[in-house]
Amino acid sequence: MFTGIIEKLGNVENITKENDNLHIAISAEFTSELKIDQSVAHNGVCLTVVAIKNNTYTVTAIKETLDKTNLNNLEIGTEVNLERAMKLGDRLDGHIVQGHVDQTATCTHIENKNGSWEFTFTYNPKLNNITIEKGSITINGTSLTVVNSKINEFSVAIIPYTYEHTNFHNFTVGTEVNLEFDVIGKYVSRLMEVKG
């Protein structure tokens, strides 16, 4: 479980393809605190640490993960939003995030609001995921509040701290991002679907 509060930005140091898998080596300030088998969210994708060497650790993304996320777009030098799993008893500053990406979205508009930014994203509505006004959404692992919710589009407002301390400062129109919709909303939506 995660909170959607990004701890650090990591850098992709190496990418190795093996069959349908990608082994991704990341350098991060907290690498020395990691252990093999720990879960870390990378742009909102929960991956297991499989190797550690100096200040770099390695995770493996399998085909299922690569098909549903933006991890195929990673290149050496790419900044990645990182969050370690939450500890029981800690404050839940964001919202409940599982680290299971539901689908990707595309950034379609960025507006500088003179002290903040508004980012707009569109996504495929055929997967039946929804947003609601003032509801929670996770974008590249960052817990955010939805504004301007539409059928296949929504916006989020980004404060300077979030802009500087996540990879939002690298987004341009056309950037593909990972989305995890609110888990409670997903259960309600599924229940309504089953009930007809």
Image (cartoon, helix red, strand yellow):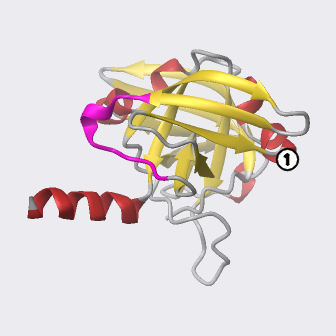
Where, by quadrant of the figure, is residue 136 drawn? bottom right
Front position in the image: 14 or 126:
126
Q: Residues within 10 Å of mark 1 (few under 14, many from 20)?
A: few
Residue at (40% x, 33% y) in the render = 152
Q: Quadrant of residue 112?
A: top right
Q: Which residue is mark 1?
A: 161
Q: Farthest bottom residue? A: 89
Q: What segment carries the magenta color?
A: 123-132
User: Predominant secondary structure in magenta?
Assistant: loop
Q: Would residue 54 be visible to someone looking at this image? A: no
Q: Residue at 30% of width from left, 29% of height from top? A: 63
Task: Give the residue displayed 60% in from the left and 17% down from the top.
Answer: 75
Looking at the image, the residue that sits furthest to the right is: 114
Residue 109 on image: x %, y %: 64, 22
Is 10 left, or right, of 87 in this rendering?
right
Q: Quadrant of residue 173?
A: top right
As drawn, 125 above or below 128: above
